[in-house]
Amino acid sequence: MATAHLIHGYLGAGKTTFARQLELSLPAIRFTHDEWMARLYGTDPPLEHFPENHRRVSEQIGAVWPRCLELGLDVVLDLGFWSRSQRDETRAQVARIGAEVRLYHLSCSDEQAWQRIEKRNAALDGSLFIARNTFEVLKDRFEPLASDEPRVAV
């Protein structure tokens, strides 16, 4: 049975690195939101267009990965899954398709995450530039996993 592998974690936690490894080991088709954003809108898209660009990329990815599951292909969804509502909606969608869900949780200290981001910022290769202020401000939008959400800790 096909499985949707959901990758959860904050900025710099190692989600994309893990997703790439998982993609190869399964095998599966990987969907990494930031890579699509960078390819379509550049590595540092203008802030005033970011919400609309983010929405467009999300809609495009959302139109493709369910079909992969329907065809019996595993997918790795490197989409952050920062909100409980996004996780719940995705789990419900996967269940309607008749596939399985596996949720992976990645975390590290803020210090380690920021070091990873600085290294990535120095050589953006399909990644988005993240300023320190952005790293701090976005923490308010990140919802940790609840105790009733089964997960694999990475």
Image: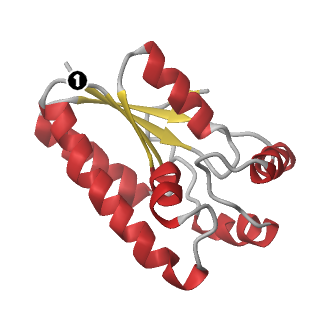
Residue 89 visible somewhere in the drawing = no
Q: Is residue 113 above or below residue 19?
A: below
Q: Where is mark 1, residue-wise?
A: 2
**Left or right for 13, reference 80:** right
Q: Is residue 30 above or below residue 91?
A: above
Q: Residue at x 66, y 37 (%)?
A: 14
Q: How is the image coloured?
A: secondary structure
**Left or right for 103, reference 131:** left
SS under mark 1: loop
* Amino acid type at image mark 1: Ala
How packed mark 1 is, by other alpha carbons closer than 10 Å (few <14, some 14-19, many 20 or more), is some
Q: Is residue 135 above or below residue 80?
A: below
Q: Residue furthest bottom?
A: 48
Q: Residue at x 23, y 25 (%)?
A: 73
Image quadrant occupied by the N terminus: top left
Residue 21 visible somewhere in the drawing = yes
Say which quarter of the image contains residue 102. Answer: top left
Percent coordinates x, y for residue 21 in the rendering = 54, 22
